Amino acid sequence: MDKLFNLGNISDAERALMEKRKVDFSKIRSKFKNESRKDSKPTECLVCKQETPKFCNSHSMPASFLRNIAVEGKVHTTNKIIDMPLLGTEEGVNKIGTFKLICRDCDSKIFQEYEEPANYNNAPTDKMIAQIAMKNHLRSIGKRRDEISLYKNLNGLGQINNPFINGMLEVQTLDLNEYLRGFKKAKRAIEKNWENEYYLFFSEKLNYVVPLAFQGEISLHFDLDGNIINDVYNKSKKYIIQTIHISVFPLESTTIIMLFIDKNHKRYRRFYQQFNKLNLEQKLGVINFIIFSYAEDVFMSKKLHENYLKNENLQKVADLTSIQFFDGTKDGSNGLKNSFDLSNMNNIPNFLLIDVEKGS
Ligand SMILES: [Zn+2]
């Protein structure tokens, strides 16, 4: 598997095989996706516990931010870069990154502060940070639930060998429990007005609108010196994944960028110490690189020049995400480790330095 991630050494034959496996997996996935989604729907709102409520199509990325980079209500998805067959390359801002875990009433209330652009006139509050964390955890919970029920369905049909699926299910379930724990903590922090539960180590307002929007939690494998943060090979039940929350919110004429962690996620200490020593341009380069190499839900402006999206190095980096995804494992650390240094970060266009209006 490691060989696959050493993208520089891939032969044409290997690449063709990867492409084929990706397509096959996409086909299988889309076939079972809808069915699996139905199975994975909870019976009660995760926030207020109301039973069988009208579930809301919650958005992982608020439309209020996406609209600032949209053209005719649409933005590019990551697939615009990697161009995987069967998946679209654009999406309407109202359809983006949805999960169905909470009721409409809760959805309209519990994210209000952080989704209000005017609240970024001042420094983000503890409540806003906790709301972002809660939303990210809900999104992760939704994804894990979908995947678990997808794997269960696949297992039942014997599409892939059972030990592989069973191993995946075990990992997914551990992850799910961790995201649930994080969600409950964020919810309590909001209700009780707890302060300093999260460590916001980067918060910046850029005086231009970047052509990229992102909100999510990511479990980094390595820090900037290649030290392990999350050991993906550690299968111990006591070993919990630790995530970093990243937000890139395009506003009307500015951009808010924030990085924070749960204060108990101490394995990030070295990372944020290294990060804090960088200048702003380098910091933005790191954030840009992390987003493209780890995340699936990245949204880009359709105003952005094609040359940026068709950049070969960017395609390779963004492809890492899809390979991890199609394989269903989180392996591939060696490949990421090879890629994960500042010189490589500078090989891909840094979207966070681009002013969407000027296009460069
Ligand atoms: Zn509710």
Image (cartoon, rainbow, N blue to C red):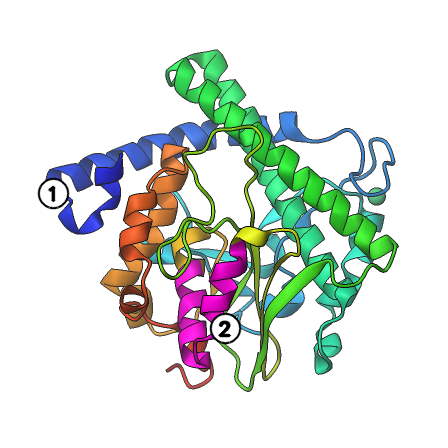
The numbered mark at residue 254 is none
Query: Is residue 216 located in the magenta-colored stretch of the structure?
Result: no
Residue 83 seen anywhere in this rendered image of the structure:
no
Are there few (<14), some (14-19), or many (20+) residues within 10 Å of tag 2? Answer: few
Hey, what amino acid is under mark 1?
Answer: Ser
What residue is shown at x 61% (from left), y 32% (from top)? 145
Q: Which residues are magenta?
A: 268-290
Q: In the rendered view, would you say 200 is above or below 359?
A: above
Q: Taken as a whole, is the magenta stretch helix, strand or loop?
A: helix
Label 2 vs 1, first from the N-terminus: 1
Q: In the rendered view, would you say 331 is above or below 170?
A: below
The numbered mark at residue 11 is 1
Hey, what amino acid is under mark 2?
Answer: Asn
Kindly state the secondary structure of the residue where label 1 is placed. loop
Residue 359 seen anywhere in this rendered image of the structure:
yes
In this rendered view, identify the residue nearer to me: 68 or 330.
330
The numbered mark at residue 276 is 2
| Percent x, y of residue 274 | 45, 67
Quarter holding the C terminus? bottom left
| Percent x, y of residue 221 | 42, 48
Q: Quadrant of residue 113?
A: bottom right
Q: In the rendered view, would you say 181 is above or below 282?
A: above
What is the C-alpha distance between the residues marked 2 and 1?
39 Å
Quarter holding the N terminus? top left
